[in-house]
Structure formats: structure tokens, C-alpha cells
Image: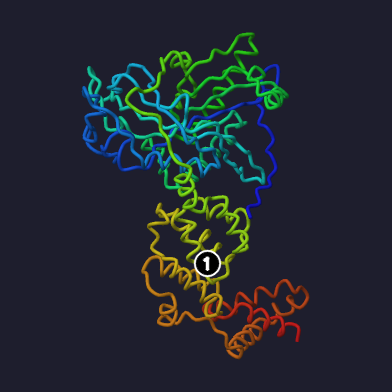
Amino acid sequence: MLDLTYDTPKVRTIAGAKHDWELVIGMEVHAQVLSNAKLFSAASTKFGAEPNNNVAFVDAAMPGMLPTINEYCVEQAVRTGLGLKAEINLHSAFDRKNYFYPDLPQGYQISQLYHPIVGEGEVLVELGDGTARLVRVERIHLEQDAGKSIHDMDPNMSFVDLNRTGVALMEIVSRPDIRGPEEAAAYLTKLRQILRYLGTCNGDMQSGAMRADVNVSICLPGQYEKYQDTQDFSHLGTRCEIKNMNSMRFIQQAIEVEAKRQIAIVEAGGEVVQETRLFDPDKQETRSMRSKEEAHDYRYFPDPDLLPLVIEQAWVDDIGANLPELPDAKKARFINDFGLSDYDASVLTSDLDSAGYFEATAQGRDGKMAANWVINELFGRLKKDEKAITDSPVSPAQLGGVIDLIASDAISGKIAKDLFEIVYTEGGDPAVIVEERGMKQVTDTSAIEAAVDEIIAANPDQVAKARENPKLAGWFVGQTMKATGGKANPKAVNQIVAQKLNG
């Protein structure tokens, strides 16, 4: 059973000239549906194709071409909703959002304003300090993406690439439950993690597969609680939307900059105007893009070419029955089954590949030891070499072999690190390497005893000091390990040194 008890974090405040102010943040995340074909055509969604190669007639708005719904995209949206513990609407519908833009050939975007496919859900956002914020999801709707205008290829002309036109997007709209820049980044990180576990979006922000519009407002302490009690937005300040953010770092910077801008306006006696703004990371400022539109500005109406979308509860139940283990459940299981700390379990479940690697390594072994080797040795070395876990030169079986040799006292921890380096750079079976290269630790107590006797005999002054101060016995342990080439069993060395010095 999942233990989702948590403490709510303290609200982040920003000091103004006159008051301390609190931040209120909501996010609209556009996540590209992981699908081979677009939402209403069979054109490819492959990233990086030559411009205007992945374009069907319907994407280019050729006369007489009608959209046909991609059932798999609908299934992916339902899967996402279920993964966010959200209500699935068995009846939904598509609307036309009318506006002109050069990379929107139809002159409208097909979206779901009035009847989205997914209703209210939630995301538990852990913040790494023992606290967590429960962020409510208001809705998820399906819509088609627009194309891309390119302005930097020619000094006199702009170009249009329609490859993205018609690609399926899920717009995931949160409630204004996020209370600071760090929480916003943590929410987006957690949402991306869940989508990747579900296999509904790859979460790649650099390629535009995931991007966010961030709504920011400010309020005085106590006002947010009034909003929570009444759900009356008049208790909150006027919000501004920061458009098309695709970097966790820039999202945090943009929120900070925009909040300070609003504070300065309000404290000077002015009023914040609701609008869409863009963030300039070089100048560390937000600037006005356009006044905030309302639904009537887009002249929404039901799309006449698409019937209402009706799905069956049995189909939804079947999708739900085949959901993968999600991050919170996997983390709880790792803590319970392998005895891991909250931190280690969080690191290992941060993505599916890391979690799978650890679980394969830990199977039938000491979970804590396996976690230490995966996190500290393997992840550390991969980070240094700028490699992903999927490119690891050391397989779970090989790393497990190193751990088995430690557990059986065949090698010491120091030798194990040397062995790991050999396996990482050269490959091979750890057990065979230890045998062939004579790396087994010395467990013969008579041989260890002889080495200790020799060191004691050669260092009478040090013996006298160690007998006065037992903490100095470590010097003899170190000398013995050095004399045996690091192969002596450390536990046996410590015991024999203690016996000899106290004898």
C-alpha cells in the first residue's frame, strides 16, 4: 500500500518595498503524444526530418481533405489521465479555435475547449526536504500542434516548416496550487517522469516535445487561503502568462522576474494587466507579447468535420488494467523491498532505465549495497563520462558479480573499486578477472598475523604510542594493508592488530 503522507512546504515569499508577497502559479503543459502518426492524419511524427516532409494533405489544409481521429492518440490521452488519477470523460468533443498565423494552414486549430477528454486529477510533487505539494490537475485536452516559422535563414524572408502541423498534443492544465519557482520546476519534473513511465510522451524539452505556459500572480499573505476556502479568484492578483517555456532553469528565473515586476507595479499604485508575456533570459526580463485572449476572441465552435468522441468504460478499464508501475508506487516498493532510504529510492526511480538497472542488479542481493554501487560508483562514473545508463559499459550482471565477490569476502571494498574500473574499461566476468589477476583478498589469518608482527617489531615507538592512545591503532591497520597490497581482509586485520597491541 502506498504511504503518501507528507508535510506541506512553507510558502515562498518575496520582499517588496512595502510588503512581503506570496506567489501563485498555475501551469499549462503541452506534451506531445508519443505516437508514430499525427492526431488527424497518417503523416509521420518523426523528429528531425527534412522540412515539410512529414505533411499529409489534411495537414496542409488542401481543399476537401477531412480529419480522421487517430485512436492511438486518444488511448494515450486516456492512459495519461489514468496515470494522474484523473476522471476520464466518456463523451468529449473537438472545437475549432480560429486564428491566423502563417504556420497554421487551416486558419484554425482543432482543440477541446468545452468538452475535454480528461477531467480533474492530481500530481504529488515531492520537494526533496521531506515536504510535498499536491497539485490538482484541472483538465487534459487533446489538440493539434501548429507548424514552425523560421526567421533566421534569410534577411528578407521567413520560411514555414509544416512537419509539426497536426502533431497530437495533450494540454495538461493545473490549478493555481504551485507556490514558488522551485515548486514549478519540481512539478514539471514529476509530470515528465510520470509521462515517461506511462510511455505517453518522451518529455524531451529541447525538441519541443514538452513545453509549458506559466501563469504567475502575486497576493498578500492570507489571501491565498481565502481563495482556497471560496475558490474565488478575486482574492488573488491578476495573472500573466509566460509563454512557451522549455527549460527548468529558465522557468524558475522567469517566475522570479515576473513576480518582482508585478510587485513593483502594485506597490507603485498601478494595476497588473492580464496578458501573455515572453521571457528573455539574456536580459532577465519578461516583455509583453499580446493582451490575454478570452475564448470569444478565438470564435470557438464545435468542429463540423468531427463527430463527438464517445468511448466505452470497458475500454478505459482495459487501459487502466495494463498501466505500468508508476513512480510513487515503484519508490515505495524499493523502500519496502530493498530497505532503501527515501533519497536513494528517489534517485533510482527518477527514470525507468535507472530503476530497471538497479532492480536487475539488486535481485537476490543486499539492496542497500546494490544501491550504493549503482548510485555512487556507476552513476558517478557515467556522469563523468557524460553517458546515459542505457550506454553503461557495465551490465547489471557484471555489477552484481562485483557485489557477490564483496559479499563472499573474496575481495575487499578497495579491491572491488579496482575491479569495477577494470570491468568498466575492459569488460569481462568479475569472478574470472579476480582469479586470473590474483585479486582475491588474503583471509589466511596466519599470513596476516605474520605481517602485523613484522610491522610491530619494526616500530616499537609507534607501538608505545598506540598503547597509550588506542585510536593510533589505525596506523598499523594501514601499514598491514599496504604490506599485503590491499588484499588482506580488513576485518581480520583490525582484529589481529587489536589483539597484538593489547596483548
Query: Residue 190, percent across and down?
Result: 53, 42
Q: Nearer the viewer, residue 447 or 233?
A: 233
Q: Nearer the viewer, residue 458 or 228?
A: 228
> What residue sits right under mark 1 in the picture?
362
Query: Residue 4, percent across and down?
Result: 65, 48
Query: Quick one: quadrant of the C terminus?
Result: bottom right
Q: Is residue 421 left or right of residue 62?
A: right
Please say if 311 is above or below 165.
below
Mark 1 crowd level (few <14, some 14–19, many ≥20, 10 Å Cα): many
Q: Is residue 306 left or right of residue 88?
A: left
Query: Residue 16, percent across and down?
Result: 66, 20
Q: What SS does tag 1 mark?
A: helix
Task: Give the amino acid at mark 1.
Answer: Ala
Query: Residue 484, percent across and down?
Result: 54, 81
View extreme (right): residue: 468
Q: Residue at x 47, y 70 (%)?
A: 418
Residue 121 position by quadrant: top right
Residue 40 position by quadrant: top left
Q: How is the image coloured?
A: rainbow
View extreme (top): residue: 269
Q: Nearer the viewer, residue 133 or 436?
A: 133
Q: Residue at x 64, y 8 (%)?
A: 269
Please say if 347 is above or below 159.
below
Please say if 99 is above or below 321.
above
Q: Nearer the viewer, residue 82 or 28?
A: 82
Q: Residue at x 49, y 20 (%)?
A: 286
